[in-house]
Image (cartoon, helix red, strand yellow):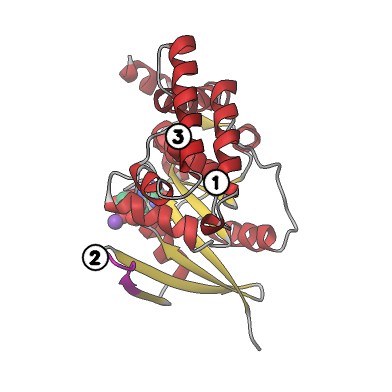
Amino acid sequence: TQLTEITVALAGNPNCGKSSLFNALTGSHQKVGNFSGVTIEKYEGYVDFKGYRIRFVDLPGTYSLTAYSPEELVTRHYLAMEHPDIVVNVIEGPNLERNLLLTTQLMEMEVELLVALNMYDEVEAQGMEIDVKQLQQLLGCHIIPTSAKARQGLDRLLDHIVRVYSGEIQIRKNKLAFRPEIEDAVKAVQAEIRHEPALDGRKYRWMALKLLENDREIYREVHQSPVWLKIERILQQAMETTGKLYQADPEILITEDRHALIRGAMEECVRMPEARKRSLT
Ligand code: GDP
Ligand code: K
Protein backbone atom coordinates (compact mmCIF):
# COMPACT_ATOMS: atom_id res chain seq x y z
CA THR A 1 0.00 0.00 0.00
CA GLN A 2 1.07 3.55 -0.77
CA LEU A 3 1.69 5.71 2.28
CA THR A 4 0.65 9.35 2.29
CA GLU A 5 3.79 11.48 2.38
CA ILE A 6 4.32 14.45 4.66
CA THR A 7 7.32 16.69 3.98
CA VAL A 8 8.81 18.22 7.09
CA ALA A 9 11.66 20.73 7.12
CA LEU A 10 13.86 20.97 10.21
CA ALA A 11 15.04 24.51 10.91
CA GLY A 12 17.10 25.77 13.81
CA ASN A 13 20.19 27.56 15.06
CA PRO A 14 23.58 25.88 14.72
CA ASN A 15 24.15 23.43 17.60
CA CYS A 16 20.49 23.22 18.62
CA GLY A 17 20.72 19.45 18.18
CA LYS A 18 19.05 19.41 14.79
CA SER A 19 21.20 16.71 13.24
CA SER A 20 20.94 14.61 16.40
CA LEU A 21 17.17 14.90 16.16
CA PHE A 22 17.22 14.16 12.44
CA ASN A 23 19.33 11.05 13.08
CA ALA A 24 17.17 9.89 15.96
CA LEU A 25 14.01 10.31 13.87
CA THR A 26 15.13 8.83 10.58
CA GLY A 27 17.68 6.23 11.66
CA SER A 28 19.17 4.49 8.67
CA HIS A 29 16.70 5.87 6.13
CA GLN A 30 18.90 8.75 5.02
CA LYS A 31 20.55 10.14 1.97
CA VAL A 32 22.71 13.18 1.41
CA GLY A 33 22.73 15.49 -1.59
CA ASN A 34 23.13 19.20 -2.19
CA PHE A 35 20.73 22.10 -2.23
CA SER A 36 20.40 23.26 -5.83
CA GLY A 37 23.14 25.59 -6.97
CA VAL A 38 25.18 25.56 -3.76
CA THR A 39 27.62 23.25 -2.05
CA ILE A 40 25.62 23.08 1.16
CA GLU A 41 24.76 19.50 1.99
CA LYS A 42 21.12 18.49 2.06
CA TYR A 43 20.27 15.62 4.37
CA GLU A 44 16.98 13.88 3.72
CA GLY A 45 15.47 10.95 5.51
CA TYR A 46 12.14 9.41 6.35
CA VAL A 47 10.27 7.48 8.95
CA ASP A 48 6.99 5.61 8.56
CA PHE A 49 4.57 6.47 11.32
CA LYS A 50 0.88 5.74 11.79
CA GLY A 51 0.20 5.15 8.13
CA TYR A 52 2.24 8.11 6.89
CA ARG A 53 5.70 8.38 5.40
CA ILE A 54 7.19 11.45 7.05
CA ARG A 55 10.05 12.85 4.98
CA PHE A 56 12.49 15.12 6.79
CA VAL A 57 14.73 17.68 5.17
CA ASP A 58 17.46 18.97 7.47
CA LEU A 59 17.97 22.63 6.59
CA PRO A 60 21.30 24.36 7.33
CA GLY A 61 21.64 25.77 10.83
CA THR A 62 20.92 29.54 10.89
CA TYR A 63 20.42 32.24 13.51
CA SER A 64 18.26 34.35 11.26
CA LEU A 65 16.64 34.51 7.82
CA THR A 66 18.34 37.53 6.33
CA ALA A 67 20.08 37.46 2.95
CA TYR A 68 23.59 37.66 4.38
CA SER A 69 24.81 34.06 4.30
CA PRO A 70 24.41 31.14 1.90
CA GLU A 71 22.90 29.08 4.75
CA GLU A 72 20.19 31.66 5.39
CA LEU A 73 19.47 32.07 1.69
CA VAL A 74 19.17 28.31 1.18
CA THR A 75 16.91 27.98 4.18
CA ARG A 76 14.49 30.74 3.30
CA HIS A 77 14.52 29.85 -0.38
CA TYR A 78 13.54 26.31 0.52
CA LEU A 79 10.74 27.53 2.78
CA ALA A 80 9.45 30.12 0.33
CA MET A 81 9.63 28.02 -2.83
CA GLU A 82 9.38 24.33 -1.89
CA HIS A 83 6.46 24.70 0.50
CA PRO A 84 7.10 21.86 2.96
CA ASP A 85 3.92 20.69 4.67
CA ILE A 86 5.29 21.43 8.10
CA VAL A 87 8.34 23.19 9.51
CA VAL A 88 9.73 21.93 12.78
CA ASN A 89 11.75 24.67 14.44
CA VAL A 90 14.28 22.92 16.65
CA ILE A 91 15.15 25.11 19.61
CA GLU A 92 18.04 24.71 22.01
CA GLY A 93 16.01 24.84 25.23
CA PRO A 94 18.75 26.19 27.52
CA ASN A 95 19.31 29.03 25.04
CA LEU A 96 15.66 29.71 24.38
CA GLU A 97 15.94 33.50 24.15
CA ARG A 98 18.62 33.55 21.48
CA ASN A 99 16.88 30.78 19.52
CA LEU A 100 13.54 32.61 19.45
CA LEU A 101 14.89 35.14 16.96
CA LEU A 102 14.70 32.52 14.23
CA THR A 103 11.28 31.45 15.52
CA THR A 104 9.89 34.95 15.03
CA GLN A 105 11.18 34.92 11.47
CA LEU A 106 9.62 31.54 10.77
CA MET A 107 6.35 32.96 12.11
CA GLU A 108 6.71 35.80 9.62
CA MET A 109 7.00 33.31 6.79
CA GLU A 110 3.59 31.94 7.76
CA VAL A 111 4.66 28.33 7.50
CA GLU A 112 2.87 25.51 9.32
CA LEU A 113 5.06 25.64 12.39
CA LEU A 114 5.82 23.17 15.17
CA VAL A 115 8.49 23.75 17.79
CA ALA A 116 10.70 20.97 19.15
CA LEU A 117 11.97 22.35 22.44
CA ASN A 118 15.15 20.30 22.34
CA MET A 119 17.75 19.58 25.04
CA TYR A 120 14.84 19.50 27.44
CA ASP A 121 16.96 17.19 29.61
CA GLU A 122 19.39 20.10 30.02
CA VAL A 123 16.55 22.54 30.70
CA GLU A 124 15.45 20.32 33.58
CA ALA A 125 18.96 19.60 34.80
CA GLN A 126 19.66 23.34 35.01
CA GLY A 127 16.46 24.01 36.92
CA MET A 128 15.18 26.34 34.24
CA GLU A 129 11.37 26.48 34.21
CA ILE A 130 9.52 27.01 30.94
CA ASP A 131 5.76 27.47 30.87
CA VAL A 132 5.29 25.57 27.62
CA LYS A 133 1.51 26.13 27.48
CA GLN A 134 1.84 29.88 27.80
CA LEU A 135 4.67 30.00 25.28
CA GLN A 136 2.46 28.05 22.85
CA GLN A 137 -0.22 30.69 23.24
CA LEU A 138 2.20 33.53 22.59
CA LEU A 139 3.86 31.95 19.58
CA GLY A 140 0.71 30.39 18.17
CA CYS A 141 2.20 26.97 17.53
CA HIS A 142 2.49 23.66 19.31
CA ILE A 143 5.64 23.08 21.32
CA ILE A 144 6.93 19.58 22.03
CA PRO A 145 9.75 19.14 24.54
CA THR A 146 12.34 16.73 23.12
CA SER A 147 15.70 15.31 23.95
CA ALA A 148 17.42 14.02 20.85
CA LYS A 149 20.21 12.64 23.01
CA ALA A 150 17.95 10.70 25.37
CA ARG A 151 15.51 9.93 22.52
CA GLN A 152 12.65 11.50 24.42
CA GLY A 153 9.60 13.20 22.94
CA LEU A 154 10.24 11.77 19.48
CA ASP A 155 6.98 9.83 19.13
CA ARG A 156 5.08 12.77 20.49
CA LEU A 157 6.71 15.00 17.88
CA LEU A 158 5.83 12.56 15.09
CA ASP A 159 2.30 12.29 16.44
CA HIS A 160 1.93 16.09 16.35
CA ILE A 161 3.26 16.21 12.80
CA VAL A 162 0.60 13.73 11.69
CA ARG A 163 -2.18 15.44 13.61
CA VAL A 164 -1.29 18.92 12.38
CA TYR A 165 -1.02 17.61 8.82
CA SER A 166 -4.38 15.85 8.99
CA GLY A 167 -5.98 18.93 10.50
CA GLU A 168 -6.86 17.08 13.70
CA ILE A 169 -5.19 19.70 15.83
CA GLN A 170 -5.02 23.37 15.12
CA ILE A 171 -3.86 26.35 17.01
CA ARG A 172 -4.63 29.97 16.39
CA LYS A 173 -1.74 31.16 14.24
CA ASN A 174 -0.10 34.25 15.57
CA LYS A 175 0.90 36.73 12.99
CA LEU A 176 3.76 38.57 14.56
CA ALA A 177 2.22 42.04 14.68
CA PHE A 178 4.53 44.98 14.27
CA ARG A 179 3.78 48.55 15.35
CA PRO A 180 0.96 50.17 13.35
CA GLU A 181 3.15 52.28 11.05
CA ILE A 182 5.02 49.15 9.97
CA GLU A 183 1.83 47.13 9.57
CA ASP A 184 0.29 49.86 7.40
CA ALA A 185 3.32 49.89 5.11
CA VAL A 186 3.44 46.08 4.98
CA LYS A 187 -0.20 45.96 3.92
CA ALA A 188 0.29 48.60 1.23
CA VAL A 189 3.39 46.91 -0.24
CA GLN A 190 1.75 43.50 0.01
CA ALA A 191 -1.21 44.74 -2.05
CA GLU A 192 1.15 45.89 -4.81
CA ILE A 193 3.06 42.61 -4.85
CA ARG A 194 -0.23 40.76 -5.15
CA HIS A 195 -0.93 42.67 -8.39
CA GLU A 196 2.23 41.40 -10.03
CA PRO A 197 1.49 38.19 -11.99
CA ALA A 198 5.17 37.20 -12.00
CA LEU A 199 4.97 36.88 -8.22
CA ASP A 200 1.81 34.78 -8.09
CA GLY A 201 1.70 32.29 -5.25
CA ARG A 202 4.56 33.88 -3.35
CA LYS A 203 4.55 34.85 0.30
CA TYR A 204 3.32 38.43 -0.16
CA ARG A 205 3.38 39.55 3.46
CA TRP A 206 6.84 38.15 4.01
CA MET A 207 8.21 39.79 0.85
CA ALA A 208 6.70 43.11 1.86
CA LEU A 209 8.34 42.87 5.24
CA LYS A 210 11.68 41.99 3.63
CA LEU A 211 11.44 45.02 1.33
CA LEU A 212 10.89 47.22 4.38
CA GLU A 213 14.05 45.67 5.79
CA ASN A 214 15.99 46.57 2.63
CA ASP A 215 16.52 42.92 1.82
CA ARG A 216 18.71 42.91 -1.26
CA GLU A 217 17.59 39.53 -2.60
CA ILE A 218 13.88 40.34 -2.54
CA TYR A 219 14.69 43.79 -3.93
CA ARG A 220 16.45 42.14 -6.87
CA GLU A 221 13.35 40.05 -7.51
CA VAL A 222 10.90 42.92 -7.40
CA HIS A 223 12.65 46.07 -8.57
CA GLN A 224 12.21 45.42 -12.28
CA SER A 225 8.53 44.70 -12.02
CA PRO A 226 6.00 47.35 -13.11
CA VAL A 227 4.72 47.68 -9.53
CA TRP A 228 8.12 48.70 -8.21
CA LEU A 229 7.59 52.46 -8.63
CA LYS A 230 4.55 52.30 -6.39
CA ILE A 231 6.33 50.11 -3.88
CA GLU A 232 9.29 52.46 -3.80
CA ARG A 233 6.96 55.36 -2.97
CA ILE A 234 5.39 53.37 -0.13
CA LEU A 235 8.81 52.49 1.28
CA GLN A 236 9.91 56.12 1.04
CA GLN A 237 6.75 57.24 2.80
CA ALA A 238 7.26 54.66 5.54
CA MET A 239 10.82 55.91 6.12
CA GLU A 240 9.59 59.47 6.49
CA THR A 241 6.82 58.46 8.87
CA THR A 242 8.97 56.31 11.15
CA GLY A 243 11.78 58.84 10.98
CA LYS A 244 9.49 61.52 12.35
CA LEU A 245 7.83 59.31 14.97
CA TYR A 246 10.71 57.15 16.16
CA GLN A 247 13.86 58.66 14.62
CA ALA A 248 14.52 55.26 13.07
CA ASP A 249 14.08 53.39 9.80
CA PRO A 250 11.52 50.59 9.43
CA GLU A 251 14.39 48.08 9.32
CA ILE A 252 15.45 48.99 12.86
CA LEU A 253 11.89 49.04 14.17
CA ILE A 254 11.10 45.61 12.74
CA THR A 255 14.09 44.20 14.60
CA GLU A 256 13.02 46.02 17.78
CA ASP A 257 9.50 44.62 17.55
CA ARG A 258 10.80 41.07 17.15
CA HIS A 259 12.95 41.51 20.23
CA ALA A 260 10.05 43.00 22.16
CA LEU A 261 8.00 39.86 21.50
CA ILE A 262 10.91 37.68 22.58
CA ARG A 263 11.49 39.70 25.76
CA GLY A 264 7.79 39.51 26.59
CA ALA A 265 7.76 35.76 26.04
CA MET A 266 10.83 35.29 28.24
CA GLU A 267 9.33 37.40 31.03
CA GLU A 268 5.99 35.63 30.91
CA CYS A 269 7.08 32.06 30.33
CA VAL A 270 10.56 31.45 31.69
CA ARG A 271 12.05 31.31 35.14
CA MET A 272 15.80 31.01 35.26
CA PRO A 273 17.50 29.20 38.13
CA GLU A 274 19.11 31.54 40.66
CA ALA A 275 22.62 30.52 39.62
CA ARG A 276 22.08 31.53 36.00
CA LYS A 277 20.36 34.76 36.93
CA ARG A 278 23.42 35.71 38.96
CA SER A 279 25.81 34.80 36.17
CA LEU A 280 23.89 37.01 33.74
CA THR A 281 24.20 40.17 35.84
P1 GDP B 1 23.21 20.74 15.12
O1 GDP B 1 24.35 21.65 14.85
O2 GDP B 1 21.96 21.49 15.40
O3 GDP B 1 23.02 19.69 14.11
O4 GDP B 1 23.54 20.04 16.53
P2 GDP B 1 24.04 18.56 16.84
O5 GDP B 1 22.98 17.57 16.57
O6 GDP B 1 25.36 18.34 16.21
O7 GDP B 1 24.19 18.67 18.43
C1 GDP B 1 25.05 19.59 19.04
C2 GDP B 1 25.49 19.02 20.38
O8 GDP B 1 24.38 18.93 21.26
C3 GDP B 1 26.03 17.60 20.28
O9 GDP B 1 27.09 17.48 21.19
C4 GDP B 1 24.86 16.73 20.70
O10 GDP B 1 25.27 15.51 21.28
C5 GDP B 1 24.18 17.59 21.72
N1 GDP B 1 22.72 17.35 21.82
C6 GDP B 1 21.85 17.25 20.79
N2 GDP B 1 20.60 17.05 21.24
C7 GDP B 1 20.68 17.03 22.60
C8 GDP B 1 19.71 16.87 23.66
O11 GDP B 1 18.51 16.72 23.44
N3 GDP B 1 20.18 16.93 24.93
C9 GDP B 1 21.50 17.12 25.21
N4 GDP B 1 21.86 17.16 26.50
N5 GDP B 1 22.42 17.28 24.25
C10 GDP B 1 22.03 17.22 22.96
K1 K C 1 26.21 19.34 13.31
Assign a secondary structure to mark 2.
Answer: loop
Q: Of marks 1 and 3, which one's residue comes earlier in the chain?
A: 1
Q: Residue 232 location, x and y as percent?
A: 45, 34
Rendered image quadrant of residue 134: top right
Total labels: the figure holds 3
Q: Comparing marks 2 and 3, which lies closer to the viewer?
A: 3
Bounds of the magenta segment: 32-37
Question: Which residue of the protein is positioned furthest toward the left in this rendering?
Answer: 39
Locate the N terminus by quadrant. Answer: bottom right
Observer able to see residue 197: yes
Quadrant position of residue 4: bottom right
Q: Is residue 9 found left or right of 216 in the rendered image? A: right
Residue 154 belongs to the span the image colors magenta: no
Name which of mark 2 and mark 1 comes first in the sequence. 2
Q: Are marks 2 and 1 in contact (CB under 8 Å)?
A: no
Specify the amino acid type for callout 2.
Answer: Thr
Disc 2/disc 1 C-alpha distance (Å): 31 Å
Q: Is residue 124 visible?
A: no
The residue carrying mark 3 is: 232
Query: Is 36 covered by the magenta stretch?
Result: yes
Q: Which mark is residue 39?
A: 2
Callout 3 amino acid: Glu
